[in-house]
Image (cartoon, grey):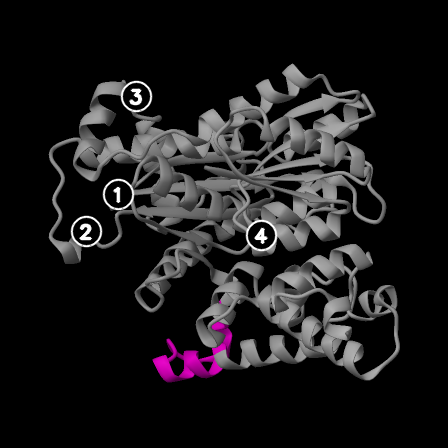
Amino acid sequence: MYNILIVDDEPLICKGLGNLLQSSGLNIKEIFTAGSGHEALDYLRMEDIDLLITDIQMGAMNGIELMHQAKIIKPWVQAIVISAHETFQYAQLAIKLGAKDYIIKPIKSEQFLDSVREVLLHMDKPLPAEGDLISQLREHFRMETPGPQRTERLNAVLSGQEAVPEESELARLGLAGPYFAVVKVKLDPDREQSGHRYGDGDEALLQYAALNIVNELLGKDWRYDAFYTPGIEVSVLIHWDDASFGDSSVDKINQLELIGRSLHHNISKYLNLPCVVGISQILKGAAFLPALGEQARKAILWNREHKDHHVFYYGDFKWSLFGKEPTEEEWAEQNNQIVEKAMAYIQQNFAQKGLTLHEVAQRNHVSPNYLSYLFKKNTGFNLWEYVIKLRMEESKRLLQQTDLRRYEIAERVGYESPEHFSKIFKKYYGISPSELKK
């Protein structure tokens, strides 16, 4: 069963769509409604949301920005956009962010339910049992090896075994750049330790299936090359020209991490296969291709230290601080410092409206993905739970020790509306602010 979040600053629309879904007979567990983007983010952080249905035009945070933030929190959340504006630019942005549909108001009930039904049906794809995976791949995939000569050449360059191509060859390969990054996906990383062996051709089948997921995820929106790498790996060489890289409206490292987390999620879900993703930094110039390949390879190695984490960005590990590979104690000390600094920043800024994980991560010079992992590992609760804890403790103190009204307290602890504040308060303490006041 699925959880759906409806976001619109018109309460009647939220209520109407919620009622429509409740009576639809679809496989729905719970429906949440939010009147703003910031309120919606709290649900996305705290609840297991499967489908986001959002309006475009909404006060301080519009639907496009909400989708951006939702993808950072949970890249696999599906989205449907509703709008009163039949504007191509909005529709294009929404689709680029992965929206499954763009529905124009006034909403027709059947069209809306058909759209939701279609999204949920695709989520219903069953996981293959481990023993059935290879046989299913053999049955359903007619495998074509992706450009063996090109694959061999790219692997040789990324591994440093051959010289970086001259400009003319780069142009023939379609790798104009000049900005490059490498994402590596290692499939079934523990197979050597477990003694798991595949039959002839089975490794290539797994790579082929993973490559299909890469191509479906990146599609036409990215300039990239995806190819097999020895060791049941798939490599993705992503490149940007000056114009696309110069667009400062999108954080490129964030985008790479979203790709990494989405790849891990989809390969785990649709192939029922464990994998680890390593992401390099972004460097300018084809001369750095071997360095980028090595960065992605090294990033994957950190899964040995963090078995419960699966997407690693090379830039999160401060290699330059150490003359040689750091000891386990040195890494633990560095990680503890990251968490301590994050906690200190949150303690100072928890009452700030619109506080995001991305902002806290930037202050620590690490990726949101790695900060989330470290915070949960070191403290036992996720970062946003800590933000809510501080907000709730402060609001309880203000309720008990001051005569401030509910809307004033909501404002002081970082909530846009007193109604949203009351919902969070009741969920946290089990009673409403007014009941506590009494």
Q: Residues within 10 Å of mark 2 (few under 14, many from 20)?
A: few
Residue at the disc numbered 4: 73
In the figure, is residue 74 to the left or right of 160? right
Q: Residues within 10 Å of mark 1 (few under 14, many from 20)?
A: some
Residue type, label 1: Ile
**From the viewer's perspective, is 358 left or right of 191?**
right
Residue 144 is marked as 3
Dot placed on the residue nearer the N-terminal end, 2 or 4: 4
Q: Quadrant of the N terminus?
A: top left
Residue 320: in magenta span: yes
| Place of residue 78 in the rendered image (x, y in percent of width and height, measured from the top left) | 56, 36
Marks 1 and 3, how far apart at CA: 16 Å
Q: Is residue 220 magenta?
A: no
Instruction: Please tell me which residue is depicted at 27% across the width and 19% down the height of the picture.
Output: 140
**343 or 359, which lies in front?**
343
Kind of residue at disc 4: Ile
What residue is pinned by disc 2? 191
Which SS class for mark 4?
helix
- Image spot of residue 154 (x, y percent): 39, 39
Earlier along the polypeptide chain: callout 1 or callout 2? Answer: 2
| Pointer 4 or 1: first along the chain | 4
The three-letter code of the residue at mark 2 reads Arg
Q: Are marks 1 and 2 in contact (CB under 8 Å)?
A: yes
